[in-house]
Image (cartoon, rainbow, N blue to C red):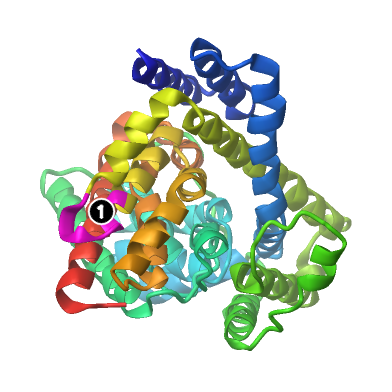
Amino acid sequence: MEVFGIALSLFLLIFFAYRGYSVILFAPVWALMAAVAQGLPIMPTYTELFMAKAVTYIKSFFPVFMLGAVFGKLMEDTGMAKSIAHAIIEKLGPRHAILSTVISCAILTYGGVSLFVVVFAVYPFAAALFKEAGMPKRFIPGCIILGAFTFTMDCLPGTPQIQNIIPTNFLGTSVYAAPVLGTVSGAIIFVIGMTWLNYRVKSAMARGEGYGDHKVNEPDIKDDMNYPSWQLSVLPLLTVLIVNYIGNTIAWNPNLLQPFAAMKIPLIVPAVKNVVSIWALIIGLVCGIVLSVVIGVKRMPQGGLAKALNVGTIGSLLAIMNTASEVGYGNVIASLPGFKTIANAMLGIHIGNSPLVSEAVTVTSIAGITGSASGGMAIALDLMAKNWLEWANAINMSPEVLHRIASMASGGLDTLPHNGAVITLLAVCGLTHREAYPDIFAMTVIKTIMAFVAIALHMVFGFI
């Protein structure tokens, strides 16, 4: 019955999220329902457990969410994100509409632009190109998912997306963890994803299907749109990557936290190495923001800078509160007696005598349940990172492999139909789940399986 109560709570959370209800409001409701059913007092559970864990997550990652959202909004409002996408799509042309859409998304994502901004920046040009090529519009979301939500989000070493940052906080690794394993895995995902999308588009066109008669959110691309040059536009992205790399490779003073420990300030990390990647990304994003303002502010409407900064900042609050609520929910569930059965089952997965399969199954399952890659991974690592680290140390496995597998697994089942990014993507493209989700799901399957293929690559070839 205890496990059933947890399962019911999870079902209700998924159902309400899918129906469009805010997880900020309903995550604590269903967490507390499960807690009360297993004998925990309701108010202490809410204030001392749910809120404590949610606030700890915000304390750890809010600067990354906020600065990432501001940087993305500036890249959007200055026209620089669209300039990069337009240059790539125009250069490759209608014959390579799929490839140009995927590459545009990949470059923007790997450069630090938030996934939501990538969707808004790339979609208009992708739609115009698909229409010119006579390719069915319903395949555009699958192309965007492949380019922005898979290999550049959490596979490639150094990606500044939050899914590659979170493990550093728990495992003491850097964003460049397991570079060979991540690069090889990312390349495989790209090849398989492109093969699938090309096959699907060609098959549909062979049956006589064209772009289709679409009326919702059809883009109006004008030839005289005044974008900055792509050469200038790419500089803020390169700045984020370069500064982030330098911050992750220089030798930081390991005693930087000591003065704050002496003040008896509660620290969120045990050592400097656990927070270096976050500090490096914060500095990189600040540099990218400053450069994007310098390059593009003249192209923004009057008052546009203040608006972009405000909108980006406010938008980040919703994003991090959603994730923090899911983290709070997960920690309440983890405190329940019934969860011990589930946790023991997850930790009991001993395939290959390593923690990797246990980790991958746990992370991708919780990401799928919550509909959030970052939220699912944060919950899983908060609950089990110490166990996986002890296991890895016992068999002389590098924490870098744990980092890369956790990051990749987080971007697997998170893109189920109730995922907020999927719902937003379909709304922007003016398509329904019925029209476009089959190919989004194909990318989900490819990405989920690839986490386990990466484990096999490590075990067989020793890739790190």
The percent coordinates of residue 212 (x first, y second) are 31, 40
Whether residue 126 is visible, yes or no, is yes
Which residue corresponds to the image point at 62% horizontal and 40% vertical from the top-left? Answer: 324
In the image, residue 101 sits, relative to residue 333, either above or below, namely below
Q: Front-most of 337 and 20?
A: 337
Task: Determine the residue positioned at 83% across, 60% down.
Answer: 305
State left or right for residue 452 relative to residue 148: left
Q: Does the magenta stretch include residue 357?
A: yes
Does residue 362 appear left or right of residue 110 in this picture?
Answer: left
Front one among 144 and 419: 419
Q: Which residue is drawn at 27% across and 75% down?
A: 184
Left or right: residue 405 compared with residue 293: left
User: Dot 1: within a 10 Å radius of its alpha carbon, few (fewer than 14), some, or many (20 or more) residues?
Assistant: many
Asked if residue 64 lies left or right of residue 263, the reply is: left
| Residue segment shown in magenta | 350-358
Q: In which quarter of the image is residue 255?
A: bottom right
The total number of labels drawn is 1
Query: What percent of the width, then of the height, locates residue 61?
Result: 66, 55
Q: Position of residue 207 (x, y in %)?
A: 11, 44
| Main SS of residues in magenta | helix
Q: What element carries label 1?
A: helix
Seen in the picture, residue 119 relative to 232 is either above or below; the reply is: above
Q: Which quadrant holds residue 230?
A: bottom right
Q: In which quarter of the image is the C terminus?
A: bottom left
Nearer the observer, 329 or 390: 390
Residue that appears at 44% across and 61% down = 153
Q: Mark 1 points at which residue?
A: 357
Q: Is residue 213 visible?
A: no
Which of the image's four quarters has the N terminus? top left
Inspect the image, locate mark 1, and give the three-letter code of the amino acid beneath it.
Answer: Val
Percent x, y for residue 162? 55, 58
